[in-house]
Amino acid sequence: QVQLVESGGGVVQPGRSLRLSCAASGFTFSRYGIHWVRQAPGKGLEWVAVISFDGSNKYYADSVKGRFTISRDNSKNTLYLQMNSLRPEDTAVYYCAKPGEVVPAANYFDYWGQGTLVTVSS
Amino acid sequence: DIQMTQSPSTLSASVGDRVTITCRASQSFSSWLAWYQQKPGKAPKLLIYKASSLESGVPSRFSGSGSGTEFTLTISSLQPDDFATYYCQQYNSYSRAFGQGTKVEIK
């Protein structure tokens, strides 16, 4: 069965860095673009970033552009999110999410990880 | 960027009620719309994709409709397990925007 397991969250001071990981199993990871979506405490869902199946294309929300970097290692079935220059407003649960189809336009999410909490606070 | 606006923000209903949630887009797009259910402390769960396609395993009391700028999620007969927050999501190759959510509460 499809599984997505995030890790790497924690408490970090403003301006510092953190790297999240998402370990995937149960599907052909290398065929899918994979996304990060976040949710601030008590708030709605916010799309963060996507990386294409082969890592050649990456897109970011304006709120994280220039600070966050998405990457993947298809040999390890793992997705990453390097978060630099963290701000208090980046505090959220971060989910990795798998699209329902391999076609690039089908960016709806049929599987989500359990999420990892990032808290940015001094 | 396309902005998605859901209404209402909160909905109070009773078991057995028919419930409709609306999602409006700031500009017209094709039927690339999904609906999710989220319960506290859990990841979202996909209910509907392509505006009206029911995800496998989702009860048939859930249905989606709409096109252009207005979309709806309907729960034909609300069940105790359906009290949750619902999100719409517009998607295509270049954007994917969520609505702000609709919380369905027990009346």
Image: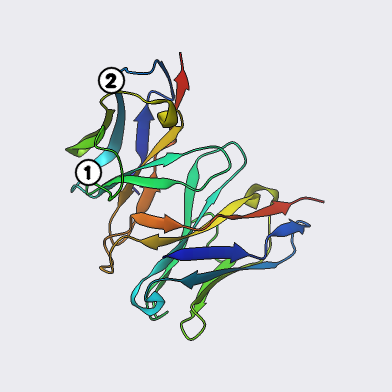
Residue A52's x, y, as percent? 38, 73
Residue B103's x, y, as percent? 46, 28
Q: Which residue is mark 1?
A: B51
- The image shows residue B77, relative to residue A70, as above or below, that is above
Left or right: A85, with B50 as reference point: right
Determine the secondary structure under disc 2: loop
Q: Residues within 10 Å of mark 2 (few under 14, many from 20)?
A: few
Q: Earlier in the sequence, mark 2 or mark 1?
A: 2
Viewer-side label of 2, 1: 2
Task: Indicate the chain on which mark 2 is placed.
Answer: B
Of residue B38 and residue B22, the one placed in the foreground of this image is B38
Which residue is most to the top?
A: B107
Task: Indicate the chain on which mark 1 is placed.
Answer: B
Q: Which residue is mark 2?
A: B18
- Residue type, mark 1 in image: Ala
- Residue type, mark 2 in image: Arg
**Residue at x-position 66% and y-position 66%:** A84
- The image shows residue A13, relative to residue A75, as above or below, that is above
Q: Residues within 10 Å of mark 1 (few under 14, many from 20)?
A: many
Left or right: B77, with A45 as reference point: left
Left or right: B50, with A38 as reference point: left
**Residue at x-position 29% and y-position 38%:** B59
Determine the secondary structure under disc 1: loop
Residue A114's x, y, as percent? 55, 55
Of residue A88 and residue A34, the one placed in the foreground of this image is A34
Residue A77's x, y, as percent? 48, 78
Cα distance, mark 2 to mark 1? 19 Å
- The image shows residue A4, relative to residue B57, as above or below, that is below
Return the mark for residue A94: none
**Residue at x-position 53% and y-position 54%:** A63
Which residue is most to the right?
A: A122
